[in-house]
Amino acid sequence: MDLTRSKTGILGLDEIMHGGIPENHTVLLTGPTGSGKTVLASQYAYMGAKKYKEPAVYLSFEETTDSIRRNALNFGWDFRALEKSESFAFVKYDPYGIDNFLNNLEGRVRELGAKRVVIDTISALDLFLRDESEYRRLLFNLYQVLEKLDCNTLLLSETVPGTPGLSRNGLEEFIVDGVVVLYYKMVNSSFSRAVQIWKMRGAEHSEKLHPFKIKKDGIEVYHTEEFHMKTKDQ
Ligand SMILES: Nc1ncnc2c1ncn2[C@@H]1O[C@H](COP(=O)(O)OP(=O)(O)OP(=O)(O)O)[C@@H](O)[C@H]1O
Ligand SMILES: [Mg+2]
C-alpha cells in the first residue's frame, strides 16, 4: 500500500520510517527516563510548524512549558516565535478537571489547524485517575478524538527498565497505530542511544535497531548503521 507520509524532519528517522509517519496515525513514543522522548517530540513539533506548514500543539503533563521552551532554545528551536505566529501552541490542562483536557486539546487543534500533536506523557495521566478502567476509558476517548481531528500524534510513554512492557500500564501499545521505542543503554561504561520502529500499521519500515545521538542542533539517527545490544540492562 502506498501511504501518504508526513516527514518528521528528524535526520535519519524519516529514512528508517521509509518516508515518515503515515497520515492520521497515533504513534506511541516510548523509552526510559532520559532516553530523549521530550527532545524528539519537541523537534518533531518544531519541524512541523517551522518547515512543513504543519502547525503543532504540545500538551505536557510532566515538564513545565517554560522548561520545554528553554531546552528547545538550546537546540535553536524558538517556540515563542512560533507561538506568536499561531503555528505552535502549548495546551494547558487543569489537574483538578483532567477530563477537560480533551476538550482543550480539540479546541486548540481546530484553532491552529494543527496537523501534529504531542502528549508528554500519557503515562503521567494515571496519577490523576482513580483506577485502570478510568485510564482505559480516557485512552480510548483520546484515540477517538485524535482520529477525528485528522492529525498525527506522538503519545509519549515510559518503559520501566527491567520490565518487558512497552509502556508503564501495558495498555497504550495496543490501541495506537505505531510504536517507536527509544533505548538508553550502558555500553563500555557510558550510555548509548538507539531507536527502533516497533510497529507502524499498514506501512513498511526498517526493522533494525539504529543508533542515534542528541547533537547541538537536535537528534540524528544513523539509519545506515545497526546498534548491537551486547550490553547489560541499566
Ligand atoms: N542541548 C542538549 N545537547 C545534548 N544533549 C542533550 C541536550 N539536552 C538534553 N540532552 C540529553 O537528553 C537527555 C534528556 O532527554 P529528554 O528530556 O528528551 O528525555 P525523556 O525521555 O523525555 O526523559 P523523561 O522521561 O525524564 O522525561 C538529557 O539527559 C541529556 O542527556
Ligand atoms: Mg520527557
Image (cartoon, rainbow, N blue to C red):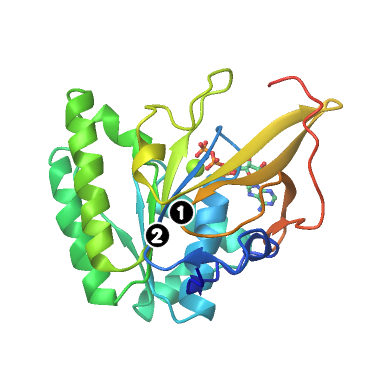
* Res. 95 in view: no
Q: Are marks 1 and 2 in contact (CB under 8 Å)?
A: yes
Badge 2 crowding class, 10 Å Cα cut-off, few under 14, some 14 to 19, many 20 or more, is many
Q: Is mark 1 within 8 Å of ligand 1?
A: no
Query: How many numbered marks, from 0 up?
Result: 2
- 232 left or right, relative to 121: right
Judging from the image, what secondary structure is the residue with disc 1 in? loop
Q: Quadrant of residue 218?
A: bottom right
Judging from the image, what secondary structure is the residue with disc 2 in? loop
Q: Quadrant of the C terminus?
A: top right
Q: Position of residue 117 (x, y in %)?
A: 37, 61
Q: Which residue is mark 1?
A: 201
Q: Residue at x 80, y 46 (%)?
A: 226
Closer to the camera in the image, 24 or 8: 24
Q: Kindly identify the amino acid type of the residue bearing the numbered disc 1.
A: Arg
Q: Which residue is mark 2?
A: 25
Q: Kindly identify the amino acid type of the residue bearing the numbered disc 2.
A: His
Q: Residue at x 64, y 60 (%)?
A: 13
Badge 1 crowding class, 10 Å Cα cut-off, few under 14, some 14 to 19, many 20 or more, is few
Q: Residue at x 22, y 54 (%)?
A: 144
Q: Is mark 2 within 8 Å of ligand 1?
A: no
State whether residue 98 is above or below residue 206. above
* Circle 1 or circle 2, nearest the eye: 1
| N-term mark: 1 or 2 | 2
Q: Quadrant of residue 131?
A: top left
Q: For the view shown, which residue lies furthest in the right direction?
A: 188
Q: Residue at x 24, y 49 (%)?
A: 142
